[in-house]
């Protein structure tokens, strides 16, 4: 982009962002009108103070007019009282507008982010998004409240005081304000510089929040690896970067303020000299001069504030640009305009020639074809990174295929209402997500209208009722952030109870038992058996105990399905599944010291074949 086009593009963006910010005021016209009216009366009161100086000096102090003195005393009291009253109302009404707009904008931004696909969250770190929702929106609140208030109030004061100045001495007024246009250009340039610094500061705050989020959630990992000092240094470096950026912004703001002071001092000095000469020569009266001088001194205060408001407006516009960037990002996954309406899914699932890319040129799935009949359990196995989780994510429509279709009951899921589709699918992950709420609220998360008895039945089916009743407050016990008060097995059983209560016809199990010990797995596996009853289940597993329960198994490698069949059929092929069975599944399933439940013994347990069983069958062949 050429040097000439970039400033033009920036100016266009600034105008667009300004219009969009001002559009936020539209629904609050009545409150805004009351605020502006209060500002106008407050500004008139300020101008009236300067106007009263002339009669006070000329008529009262020189002519000794006692009646006028009494009248001016009462008028002064009324002027100051009205200024105080109207200042209160303008502050109240403008803050009401500002906080309401911020609340609406923050809610709109959060709602928009929540509708985004997983691709969006992969590209935008959580700390960066939190910074935009919290910090950037707050900066806009400052702009709306302080900038709009200051702009209207100080503009009204400037108009009122200019009226006083020109009514007292038009020529001297021109001399007093003639230098003002000279400072506009540097103020505009500094404002643009401040906007860039504000953007940098907001990005740094996003990075700071990301560091906090990562280290607080991973504090155990940090401490166990003795990386506390490293993380403190990393956070300190970000903090110092923030301080450096803020000091550059302080320099710009201080320069603009200093220039205003110097120019204002020059103008006031000229007015004092010229006005003093006019009084000495009898051209003007002391009352007229001091009334003029008071108005001029009062004028420079709102003018200086207007200069500062320009800087604050630049910070607000910078925050607005970052917010509008998010709001202008359309969700990649949405419901179609006219979705196909279905009452309830039966669970007949088809993947037809599905190819999927996370990044161009690197297919995560390549021409995948799969079929699940209602009530069937299909296990996906294969090396890490082979595409198992991608298949599960496509079924839940967290992503859309790059090519091909995913159908349920013969209907392309892209043609279904997204809310309906996800209401028909229950998901249990390896990394269980629970919320800082009660046990009951976590189980009923997908069905908040569920009764207490329904919640308890789901917990019993998930074998969670026993440990829940042992908690101090039972089902009303708050389980802490991410369920940290519970063990891994207990958290998993709560997630299973949540899926049971949802009662969806399709179930996705993504390595739901891979991180559990043998005792926890026993309870969770039994709970999963209850959950999968009568449901079409897609299970991603690394444990033989889970795989052996599947009706069929599909082996995924490098994004393609290389084998399909039952446990026995795939072992007989002596291909990829046979290799995984010998090198991965047996080791993951066997107790640490062998024993009667070890599949390394002949025949194993629960019907699984051990190594010797495989060898015997090979000899039979």
Image (spheres, rainbow, N blue to C red):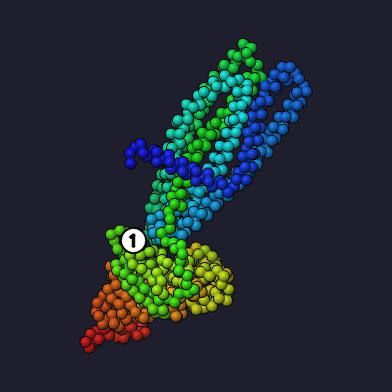
- Residue at 53% across / 22% down in the picture? 267
User: Which residue matches tag 1?
Assistant: 358
Q: Position of residue 482 (x, y in %)?
A: 48, 64
- Residue 162 visible in the picture: yes
- Depth order, front residue of 412/293: 412
In which quarter of the view is residue 76 placed? top right
- Depth order, front residue of 216/98: 98
Of all residues shown, which one is farthest toward the right?
67
- Residue at 46% across / 80% down in the picture? 530
Q: Tell me the quadrant of the picture where the N terminus can be found.
A: top left
| Label 1 Cα crowd, 10 Å radius (few <14 / some 14-19 / many 20+) | some
- Residue at 34% across / 63% down in the picture? 402
Q: Position of residue 581 (x, y in %)?
A: 29, 77
Asked if 615 appears above or below 251 in the picture, the reply is below
Q: Position of residue 41 (x, y in %)?
A: 65, 35
- Residue 377 visible in the picture: no
- Depth order, front residue of 204/332: 332
| Count of marks overlaid on the render | 1
Asked if 150 appears above or below 129 in the picture, the reply is above
Query: Callout 1: helix, strand or loop?
Result: strand
Of all residues shown, which one is farthest toward the bottom?
620
Q: Where is residue 550 in the image (x, y as percent from the top left)?
A: 37, 79
In which quarter of the view is residue 539 placed? bottom left
- Residue at 51% across / 69% down in the picture? 446
Horizontal side of residue 92 vs 335, given as left or right: right
């Amino acid at each position: 982009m050429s040097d000439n086009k970039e400033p033009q593009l920036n100016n266009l963006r600034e105008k667009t962002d300004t219009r969009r910010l001002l559009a936020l005021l539209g629904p609050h016209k009545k409150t805004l009108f009351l605020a502006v009216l209060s500002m106008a009366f407050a500004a008139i009161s300020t101008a009236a103070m300067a106007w009263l100086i002339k009669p006070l000096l000329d008529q009262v102090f020189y002519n000794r007019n006692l009646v006028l003195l009494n009248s001016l005393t009462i008028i002064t009291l009324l002027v100051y009282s009205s200024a105080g009253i109207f200042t209160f109302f303008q502050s109240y009404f403008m803050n009401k507008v500002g906080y309401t707009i911020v609340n609406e904008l923050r809610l709109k931004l959060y709602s928009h982010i929540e509708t985004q696909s997983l691709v969006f969250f992969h590209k935008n770190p959580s700390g960066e998004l939190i910074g935009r929702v919290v910090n950037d929106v707050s900066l806009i609140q400052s702009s709306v409240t302080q900038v709009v208030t200051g702009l209207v109030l100080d503009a009204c004061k400037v108009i009122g005081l200019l009226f006083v100045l020109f009514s007292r001495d038009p020529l001297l007024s021109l001399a007093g304000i003639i230098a003002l246009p000279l400072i506009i250009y540097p103020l505009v340039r500094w404002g643009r510089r401040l906007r860039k610094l504000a953007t940098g500061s907001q990005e740094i705050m996003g990075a700071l929040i990301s560091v906090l989020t990562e280290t607080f959630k991973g504090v155990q990992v940090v401490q166990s690896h003795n990386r506390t000092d490293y993380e403190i240094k990393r956070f300190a470096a970000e903090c110092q970067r923030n301080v450096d950026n803020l000091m550059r912004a302080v320099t710009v703001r201080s320069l603009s303020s200093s220039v205003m002071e110097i120019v204002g001092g020059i103008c006031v000095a000229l007015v004092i000299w010229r006005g003093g000469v006019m009084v000495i020569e009898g051209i003007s009266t002391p009352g007229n001069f001091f009334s003029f001088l008071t108005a001029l001194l009062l004028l420079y205060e709102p003018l200086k504030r207007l200069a500062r408001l320009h800087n604050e407006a630049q910070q607000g516009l910078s925050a607005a640009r970052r917010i509008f960037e998010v709001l202008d990002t359309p969700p990649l996954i949405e419901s179609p305009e006219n979705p196909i309406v279905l009452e309830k899914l039966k669970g007949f699932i088809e993947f037809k020639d599905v190819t999927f890319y996370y990044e161009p040129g690197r297919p995560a799935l390549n021409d995948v074809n799969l079929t699940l009949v209602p009530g069937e359990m299909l296990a996906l196995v294969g090396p890490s990174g082979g595409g198992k989780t991608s298949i599960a994510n496509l079924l839940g429509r967290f992503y859309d295929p790059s090519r091909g279709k995913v159908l349920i009951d013969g209907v392309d899921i892209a043609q279904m209402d997204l809310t309906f589709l996800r209401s028909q699918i229950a998901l249990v992950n390896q990394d269980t997500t629970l919320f800082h709420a009660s046990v009951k609220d976590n189980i009923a998360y997908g069905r908040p209208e569920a009764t207490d008895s329904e919640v308890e039945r789901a917990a019993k089916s998930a074998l969670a009722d026993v440990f829940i009743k042992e908690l101090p407050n039972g089902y009303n016990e708050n389980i802490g952030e991410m369920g940290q008060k519970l063990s891994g097995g207990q958290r998993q059983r709560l997630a299973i109870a949540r899926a049971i209560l949802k009662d969806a016809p399709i179930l996705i199990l993504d390595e739901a038992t891979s991180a559990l010990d043998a005792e926890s797995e026993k309870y969770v596996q039994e709970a999963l058996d209850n959950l999968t009853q009568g449901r079409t289940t897609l299970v991603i597993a690394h444990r033989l105990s889970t795989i052996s329960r599947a009706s069929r198994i599909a082996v995924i490698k490098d994004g393609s399905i290389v084998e399909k069949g039952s446990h026995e059929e795939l072992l007989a092929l002596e291909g990829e599944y046979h290799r995984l069975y010998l090198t991965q599944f047996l080791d993951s399933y066997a107790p640490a010291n062998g024993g009667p439940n070890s599949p390394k013994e002949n025949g194993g347990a629960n019907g699984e074949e051990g190594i010797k069983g495989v060898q015997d069958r090979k000899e039979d062949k």
